Image: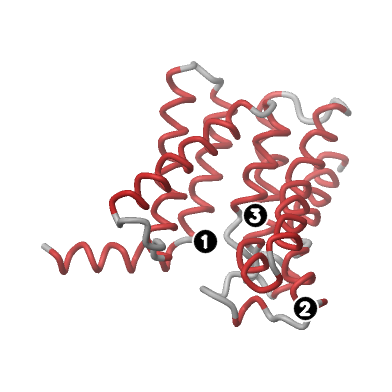
Amino acid sequence: MMILLWIACAFLSGSLMFSYWLGLAGRKNLKAVGDGNPGAMNLWKARGYKVGIFGILLDFAKGYVPVIWGISSGYAPGYLIIPLALAPIAGHAFSPFLRGKGGKAIAVTFGVWSGLIGFEVSLVYAVVLAVMKAGSFWINKNKPTSTEADGLQVVSGLLLVFIYLLLNMFSAVILLVWLGNFAILVYTHRVELASWLKKSVKLK
């Protein structure tokens, strides 16, 4: 029962849609901003960088806090850490506060990995995304990237993180957390990925 309680609390933490609520506090419905994602990036667009950064930190924390708290409390040795780590990400992606239609779970992903094994993997993922973003700007001559391209970068970036995990011989537990995380991000970015795939097929 204690394990189920930890997982439920972690899911609840992830499901708290801070960025969406901060948007509403400023009379901005994030579902009507940009791509309609109720997350921190659209909060940034709607209410400026200061509130946007606050939203990012809150979304990061709701992944970081339950994981680091669970680990420091001696919860979930071995494979039992997997559902604890994935619960905040799933909570954000399928938030009951938004009737199961949550955000894309990027900031909370960084929070979970930072709590799980320190900031190593989060830093690698951040560097990968930064390099991909810079490369995209260079190729497109400093023009803003499309939502399809952004979604592809998020998912393919996490795929590259998997290679890093393999090369550094992380445990099967960590690899399974990655697999669950990857599946959720593919789902939350399914529209962008499908659109990118259709455009790629047409170009051929």
- Disc number at residue 24? 2
Q: Which type of secondary structure does the marked residue at label 1 adopt?
A: helix
Residue at point 45% right, 32% down? Answer: 162
Q: Is residue 75 above or below residue 66?
A: above
* Picture quadrant of residue 110: top right
Q: Nearer the viewer, residue 164 or 56?
A: 56
Q: Earlier in the sequence, mark 3 or mark 2?
A: 2
Say which amino acid is labelled 3. Answer: Ala
Say which amino acid is labelled 1. Answer: Thr
Residue at point 81% right, 42% down? Answer: 66
Q: Earlier in the sequence, mark 3 or mark 1?
A: 3
The answer to the question of whether label 1 and label 2 lie on touching residues, with beta carbons closer than 8 A, is no
Real-space Cα separation, disc 3 to disc 1, in angstroms: 10 Å
Task: Give the foreground label among 3 and 2.
Answer: 2
Badge 3 is on which residue? 90
Q: Position of residue 27 (x, y in %)?
A: 77, 83
- Disc number at residue 188? 1
